[in-house]
Amino acid sequence: MLDDFNFKVLEFERKLTLEEIQEKIKTMEDLPGTYTPLGERGGRWTPDSWELPTLYFGSDGKTLEVVTKDLDMGDVDAFLCDLAQVMGCKIFSEHLEYS
């Protein structure tokens, strides 16, 4: 099922610095993309693949916005589970947990 909403707002189990996030993102060699620091607004990871969501990391170190528009929700859920493994902490939404 493709998502026609737009994005999910999620939260990390624990606070991570933007530097930690950037370093952990770099370890995703099988999922190439570009991490862009956004100053006081946080950071953005843009995947090379159109089948993966763009991620916005809040400057608070806990908030994660996942752009899901026109993506298969099963693929997004699987990706978020992989991301939780890379980050070394669970990722929560209002009703779901990724680990």
Image (tube, rainbow, N blue to C red):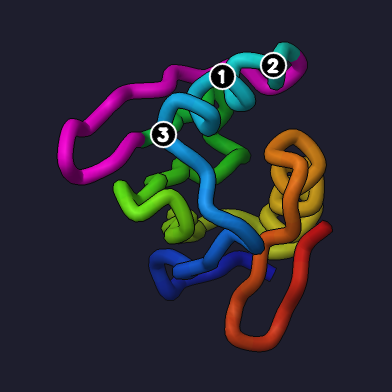
Query: Which one is in front, 38 or 46?
Result: 38
Residue under label 3: 18
Residue 11's spot in the image, x, y percent? Answer: 54, 65
Q: Which mark is residue 99?
A: none
Residues at circles 1 and 3 in contact by the CB criterion of under 8 Å: no
Residue under label 2: 27
Write the start and end of the magenta stretch as one range.
30-43
The answer for how far apart the CA atoms under marks 2 and 3 are is 15 Å
- Is 7 drawn above or below residue 75 in the view shown? below
Closest to the camera, between mark 2 and mark 3, is: 3
Q: Which mark is residue 23?
A: 1
Residue 1's spot in the image, x, y percent? Answer: 69, 70
- Is 83 drawn above or below residue 81 in the view shown? above
Residues at circles 2 and 1 in contact by the CB criterion of under 8 Å: yes
Query: Which one is in front, 75 or 37?
Result: 37
- Image side of residue 53 versus residue 74, left or right: left
Residue 82's spot in the image, x, y percent? Answer: 79, 42
Closest to the camera, between mark 2 and mark 1, is: 1
Residue 76, by quadrant, is: bottom right
Q: Amino acid at mark 1?
A: Glu
Upstream in sequence: badge 1 or badge 3: 3
Residue lying at 47% horizontally and 57% vertically, measured from the top left:
62
The answer for how far apart the CA atoms under marks 1 and 3 are is 9 Å
